[in-house]
Image: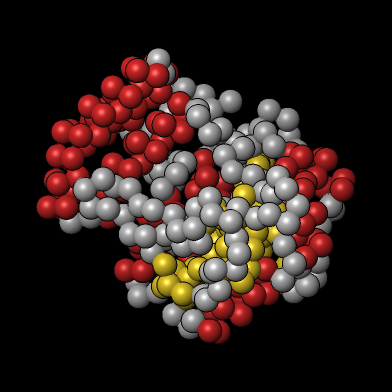
Amino acid sequence: MQSKSLVTFITVNYNQMELTLELIDSIYQHTIVPFEIIVVDNDSKVNPKEKIQELYPDVRVIVSGVNRGFAGGNNIGVRASEGEYLFFINNDAVLTEGALETMLNTFTEHPDAGIVCPLICYYPENEGVDIIQYAGATDVNPFTGRNKILGERVKDQRQYRQSKPTFYAHGAGMLVPRKIIEEVGSMSEDYFLYYEELDWCERIRKSGYSVIIQPNAKIYHKESMSVGQHNPIKTYYLTRNRILFMAMNRRREEFLFFILFLLLFTIPKNTLMYLIRGQKEHLQAFYEAICWHFKKERSPQRVVSLK
């Protein structure tokens, strides 16, 4: 790592020190431009600072002392960073050879780019077989508040080759010029977990910049390691933040249509689904998420501990 950094890697650790170490190792293996690494620890049970700096003395570890969520943790890293470009990368991801340099070159190819994302594949279970997690994203549907991830769970056969604009970045890997953050601002900490990068992309696109998917750069992602695939916490934040996102980013009439769809379709459907499956904790989390929007004092973090 050189003294003057072109790129700052920012990652947030939460009770996953081994995964974070694997990420750091991949960065050192596959990065040739000047860089720095900042690890923000979101109040893990075991402080990772000593272990990380024992193995990687140049890595800066910032212990927040409180769980500030995805956006809050990353924003701590932003304030401490020095790079011209900031690469926000999940600690359960790994970098591949040439990915960063390809993404940097994309800003020359697309001068209006505000964010460049790599092709994201699930961490491979079988050697030589890559399954795509993210190759771009559609716009959020004005009725459902949902969108579609392009290429999801499809085998990577180089069918995605051209860098091009997309609606939303994926929080597992986003390269952003510092000047964009200085102009648009950092990610909103109101979301705590999920939808914060979609909200950020809305603000960046409204400021005249584009979100670019660069499929010739690739990272691997061990998806949903921190919360888990079927955790009520995930149900809570996806539900709560979907409503918040629509309220913040859609016109009044569009938001009203969304609320009608929520009342007449989403709530009855999900209630029945959770009851049939016997998922009482998910049902509770679902209704807690909806009720959050009617509270006078609305904390970004759920009262139930994430630990």
Say if 63 sits above or below 210 in the image.
Answer: above
Residue for point 61% across, 80% down: 105
| Quadrant of the snapshot with the N terminus | bottom right
- Residue 269: x and y in percent read 26, 29
Does residue 132 lie above or below 47 as drawn? below
Closest to the observer, 270 or 232: 270
Q: From this viewpoint, is residue 87 visible?
A: no
> Residue visible at 41% across and 31% down?
235
Is residue 72 or residue 271 the one in the foreground? 271
Residue at horizontal 81 percent and vertical 57 percent from the top? 58
Residue 7, compared with residue 70, is above or below; it is: below
Q: How is the image coloured?
A: secondary structure
Q: Place residue 167 in its image quadrant.
A: bottom left
**Horizontally, is 287 left or right of 173 in the view?**
left
Indicate the position of residue 230 as horizontal and vertical percent values.
Answer: 50, 29
Rendered location of residue 146, percent (x, y): 33, 48
Res 206 → quadrant? bottom left
Instruction: Say if residue 307 shows up in the picture.
Output: yes
Q: Is residue 90 left or right of residue 29?
A: left
